[in-house]
Amino acid sequence: MAIFLTEQSRIMVQGITGTEGTRHTRRMVAAGTTVVAGVVPGRDGERRDGIPVFGDVPAAVAATGADTSVVLVPPRFAKAAVLAAVDARVRLIVVITEGIPVHDTVEFTARARAAGVRVVGPNCPGLISPGRSNAGIIPADIAERGRIGLVSKSGTLTYQLMHELRDLGFTTCVGIGGDPVVGTTHIDCLAAFQDDPETEAIVLIGEIGGDAEERAADYIAAHVTKPVVGYVAGFTAPPGRTMGHAGAIVSGSSGTAAAKKAALEAAGVTVGTTPTETARLMRDLLARC
């Protein structure tokens, strides 16, 4: 099985008629994903590459049974788009949009949590269960279905580890996003991978800033029995400077790559110093299993 996303997932794309919406919908469909609807206000009744477009989320859900949404709308429309999907009880909402104000994210993630709806992102590449479904912008042709679960703050590092371990394959790869507030955390994914019988080992990718990796380390020590290999981006980052992701900023000694590496290793995680070394560590670990 996979986590969060399976071949039964029925996906709608909010913002399907935009340039990015159209392009990534085509890539999802080419990967075998079941895309059943698009949603764009004022475009009800149109079709995009044969996919019906609805003017609002309730109409799309009622007509197609969509249970997953991929949000590819400009930042100023993102909160309304997510809340519409939450109110329609879409079970999984994948927010690709970057640049969403933090207070908007705080509001829609809180509403989603209260409604029992899972949000992945924002500012993330989405998630993929190779060979089954792809919700977002992760390239589908760089890895096969296999034995590893992957959770990452970084889209680029998600792609690199998928490519480096493509022969071993993945159950699900989840890009949770690098903003200060995200809907799904490392811990959420660790718990799901621990319960997934097909996942034999887990790759955890973090980066500087915040304490998500330290909290993940505490969770691993208490709850995860499967082997975990980790990587923390940002060993050479200068303190006080934001590095790419909004959440990747270090002040003082808190949130440094060295502190996160130490916390993960104390929890029994094998931590690589480069993505390639991290892939090798996972390969060596699975060879011993």
Image (cartoon, rainbow, N blue to C red):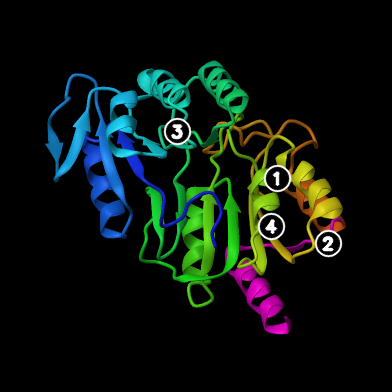
Q: Is residue 267 above or below residue 94?
A: below
- Whether the magenta-drawn stretch holds residue 50 is answered as no
Q: Which quadrant of the rendered structure holds the C terminus?
A: bottom right
In this picture, which residue range is highlighted in magenta? 267-289
Q: Is residue 66 left or right of residue 150?
A: left
Q: Residues within 10 Å of mark 2 (few under 14, many from 20)?
A: some
Mark 2 lies on residue: 268
Label 4 close to label 3 by CB (< 8 Å): no
Label 3 close to label 1 by CB (< 8 Å): no
Cα gap from disc 2 to disc 3, whole angstroms? 37 Å
Q: Is residue 62 above or below residue 66?
A: above
Q: Residues within 10 Å of mark 1 (few under 14, many from 20)?
A: some
Which amino acid is tagged 3? Answer: Val
Mark 1 lies on residue: 187
Nearest to N terminus: mark 2 or mark 4: 4
Nearest to N terminus: mark 2 or mark 3: 3
Q: Which mark is residue 90?
A: 3
Which of the 4 image quadrants contains residue 268?
Answer: bottom right
Q: Which mark is residue 41?
A: none
Which of the 4 image quadrants contains residue 88?
Answer: top left
Q: Residue at x 47, y 50 (%)?
A: 127
Front residue of 271/90: it is 90
Asked whether the viewer can see residue 138, the reply is no
- Please name which of the two marks, 1 or 4, marks the residue nearer to the observer: 4
Label 1 close to label 2 by CB (< 8 Å): no
Q: Residues within 10 Å of mark 4 (few under 14, many from 20)?
A: few
Mark 4 lies on residue: 195
Which amino acid is tagged 2? Answer: Gly
